[in-house]
Image (cartoon, rainbow, N blue to C red):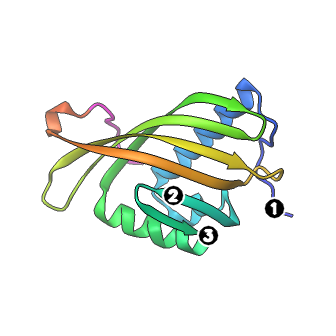
Amino acid sequence: METKPPLPPFTLETAQQKIQAAEDAWNSRDPERVALAYTVDSEWRNRSEFFSGREAIKAFLKRKWEKEQDYRLKKELWCFMDNKIAVRFEYEWHDNAGQWFRAYGNENWEFADSGLMQRRYASINDQAITASERKLLWERP
């Protein structure tokens, strides 16, 4: 059986570890890597899209990062209990025309006993920004 420590039930420390691992994976912009954190039948809601399964997750992330270029994400713990974690996040990206955006949102996560995420529900809003308004700056690895 696949496992992805830390495992539930979460403590403050393990919830923060789970969030940091998710942030690191998403900032890699590697759909294969990100998808490994989810159960094979994981349920997702991302904005107005609903889908399930790792293959759908990979396809979604590939589309996402083709559109959302130079993506950079920061997640923060909102709350946790047992096998659930809620986070607030913001990320920045630009489109093909060079327009920058900052997205704000919340995610509700539910984990299987294996530590893999079985449900991810995300609510997200975008705001157009100028390049000088960016705050999530980083150098590419």
Residue at x 62% of width, y 70% of height: 53
Residue at left 77%, top 49%?
A: 115
Secondary structure under tag 2 reads strand
**SS at circle 3:** helix
- Left or right of residue 73: residue 101: left
Kindly identify the amino acid type of the residue bearing the numbered disc 3.
Answer: Arg
Sooner in the amino-acid sequence: mark 2 or mark 3: 2
Judge from the rendering whether residue 35 lies leftward or rightward of residue 97; answer left or right: right
Residue at figure coordinates x 38%, y 69% from the top left: 63
Identify the element where label 1 is drawn.
loop
Q: Residue 54 carries which label?
A: 3
* Residue 82 position (above or below residue 44): above
Q: Is 33 in front, or is 87? A: 87
Query: Residue 85's x, y, as percent?
Result: 65, 37
- N-terminal label among 3 and 1: 1
Q: Which residue is at a point 38% across and 63% down the rendered structure image?
A: 64
Indicate which disc residue 45 carries.
2
The residue at which mark 1 appears reads as 2
Q: Position of residue 110 (x, y in %)?
A: 69, 47
Amino acid at pointer 2: Arg
| Residue 86 point in image, percent of width and height | 59, 36
Q: Which mark is nearer the camera, 1 or 2? A: 2
